[in-house]
Image (spheres, rainbow, N blue to C red):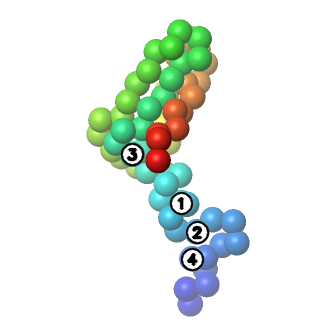
């Protein structure tokens, strides 16, 4: 019965990380260097834009 939850491409953790907007996520504008950081988490898609271009997520140091 649980087979439907495990797709070959995406497991549950990957879905969570793809849809969760985590506190501390940082996005940067490649044009002007403006940076934003998420201070309140949520669920959905976050696509911040600056200068009409999508801001790129900055990898957190692990
Ligand atoms: Zn900018």
Query: Residue under circle 2?
Result: 11
Left/right placement of residue 26 relative to residue 4 reads: left
Residue at point 53% right, 33% down?
57
Please identify, in this view, whether the residue under mark 1 or under mark 3 is nearer the observer.
Answer: 3
Pointer 2 with pointer 3, Cβ within 8 A: no
Which residue matches tag 3?
A: 22
Q: Is residue 7 found left or right of 47 in the rendered image?
A: right
Q: Name the front one of labels 4 and 3.
A: 3
Q: Residue furthest left?
A: 40
**Residue 34, position as x, y percentages in the image:** 46, 15
> Which sits earlier in the primary sequence, circle 1 or circle 3?
1
Q: CA distance from mark 4 to mark 1?
A: 11 Å
Q: Are marks 4 and 1 in contact (CB under 8 Å)?
A: no
Q: Residues within 10 Å of mark 3 (few under 14, many from 20)?
A: some
> Which quadrant: the N terminus?
bottom right
Label 4, secondary structure: give it.
helix
Q: Which residue is mark 1?
A: 15
C-alpha distance separating marks 1 and 2: 6 Å
| Mark-to-mark CA distance, 4 and 3 | 23 Å
SS at mark 3?
A: loop
Q: Which residue is mark 4?
A: 5
The residue at the point 53 percent across, 52 percent down is 18
The reply to whether callout 1 and callout 3 are in contact (CB within 8 Å) is: no
User: Is tag 2's residue or tag 4's residue first in the polypeptide sequence?
Assistant: 4
Residue 11: give x, y in percent of width and height. 58, 68
Q: CA distance from mark 2 to mark 3?
A: 18 Å
Tell me whether the residue at label 2 lies in contact with that at label 4, contact meaning CB atoms closer than 8 angstroms: no
Q: Kindly tell me whether residue 7 is visible in this rendering.
A: yes
Q: Nearer the viewer, residue 29 or 48?
A: 29
């Amino acid at each position: 019965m649980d087979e439907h939850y495990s797709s070959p491409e995406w497991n549950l953790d990957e879905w969570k990380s793809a849809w969760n907007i985590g506190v501390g996520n940082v996005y940067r504008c490649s044009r002007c260097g403006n940076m934003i950081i998420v201070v309140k988490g949520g669920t959905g898609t976050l696509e911040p834009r600056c200068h009409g271009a999508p801001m790129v997520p900055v990898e957190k140091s692990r």
